[in-house]
Amino acid sequence: MGFFTEEIAIDLGTANTLIIHNDKVIINCPSIVAIDRSSGKVIAIGEEAKMMQGKTHENIRTIRPLKDGVIADFNASEQMINLLIKSIPALNRRFFSPSLRMVICIPSGITEVEMRAVKESAERVNGKEVYLIHEPMAAAIGIGIDIKQPKGNMIVDIGGGTTEIAIIALSGIVCDKSIKIAGDVFTNDIINYMRSKHNLFVGDRTAEKIKILVGSVLEELDNPPDDISVQGRDLLSGKPKQVVISHSEIARALDKSIIRIEDAIMEALSQTPPELAADIYNTGIYLAGGGALLRGLDKRISQKTDLPIYVAEDPLQAVVRGTGIALKNIERFKTVLIK
């Protein structure tokens, strides 16, 4: 039946959804859906829907179907997954839709009900064999760690909705901590900072852009990014206005959230069995996820924990790469996959 089955690996993220087919990342787009209110039909998904975000009129609304790493809008997420799978070029050319074997990534702090929601969404889009894998586990496989060894490794995966902290040994998660402080919260911190310090009202997209261009967690950087000018609405006069923002201001804006991530890492370390703590002292901490791209984050966590910090070479794709490797070797990773 090999001809009738296709294999895909999905990293269903709060901010971005990535899909691997035939060992290649073929879809990498924002997890956003634009819906026509009157007909309930999906007008656009991904990049196209993101362009509409914050600019829609009353007939169109943009939805982010995933919140804090789990499905918040069941209908929209299903339509999004369906359209993304249909847009895979290799599946598009088939006369009939093949049955799919899928491995989907989920946060480690997810409940049974939320897990079932992900599974049902996958089954409705023709998923015949659906496996789930925890995000930190997928990130570890994607970074290239041998998870089967009797050796402790610590992964911190800072995504869009959640930060997953896990200590992994012998193909299992020994202790984990999942907190809802991640990319979305950083974006909100920036919006609030712009309001309180500059009386400037900016939208999600602008705040996201600021985070990418000058996002930093340290006020003193070795090679700081250039200042950028930001446009928005003046809260006092109501007119559009522009201000110039530097990386050190963003570091101040994000400070509280970064402290909470540091505390969660310290808490996970304090729960680690002593033998594994000895391993982590030697191997250090691995950072993955989009949040790992914040300038100075590795240095700051290193100062807090006194451990070496390694950022995955392509942190945004570490999780989906791991999910893809698990899909290719389902037998080998049987123990870490949830059927």
Image: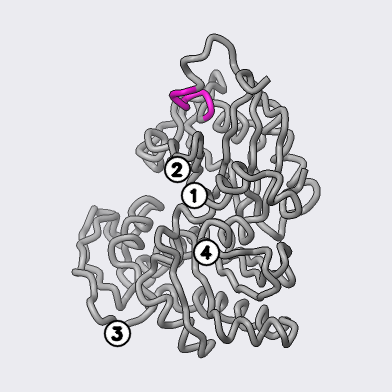
Name the residue rendered at 77%, 41% in the picture: 116
**Distance between the Cα atoms at labels 3 and 1?**
28 Å
- Dot 1 or dot 2: first in sequence order is 1
Residue 62 belongs to magenta span? no
Q: Which residue is mark 1?
A: 15
Residue at the spot of label 2? 30
Name the residue type under label 4: Ile
Asked whether the residues under the numbered discs 2 and 4 touch, taking CB atoms below 8 Å apart as contact, a structural biologist would say no
Q: Which residue is mark 4?
A: 158
Helix, strand or loop for disc 4? strand
Quadrant of the drawing holding the N terminus: top right
- Return the residue at label 3: 220
Residue at position x 53%, y 21% from top? Answer: 41
Is there a contact, CB below 8 Å, between mark 3 and mark 1?
no
Residue 165 placement (x, y as % from top left)? 62, 69
**Camera-nearest label, 3 or 4:** 4
Q: Amino acid at mark 3?
A: Glu
Nearer to the camera, 301 or 91: 91
Q: Mark 1 or 4 closer to N-term? A: 1
Residue range in magenta is 85-90
Q: Is residue 88 magenta?
A: yes
From the image, give the main secondary structure of the stretch colored magenta.
Answer: helix
Q: Are marks 2 and 3 in contact (CB under 8 Å)?
A: no
Is there CB contact under 8 Å for labels 1 and 2? yes
Residue located farthest toward the top when viewing the structure as drawn = 95
Decide: is 244 above or below 330.
Answer: below
Residue 267 in the image: above or below residue 226: below
SS for callout 1 = loop
Q: Nearer the viewer, residue 177 or 190?
A: 177
Mark 2 neighbour density, 10 Å: few (under 14) some (14–19) many (20 or more)? some
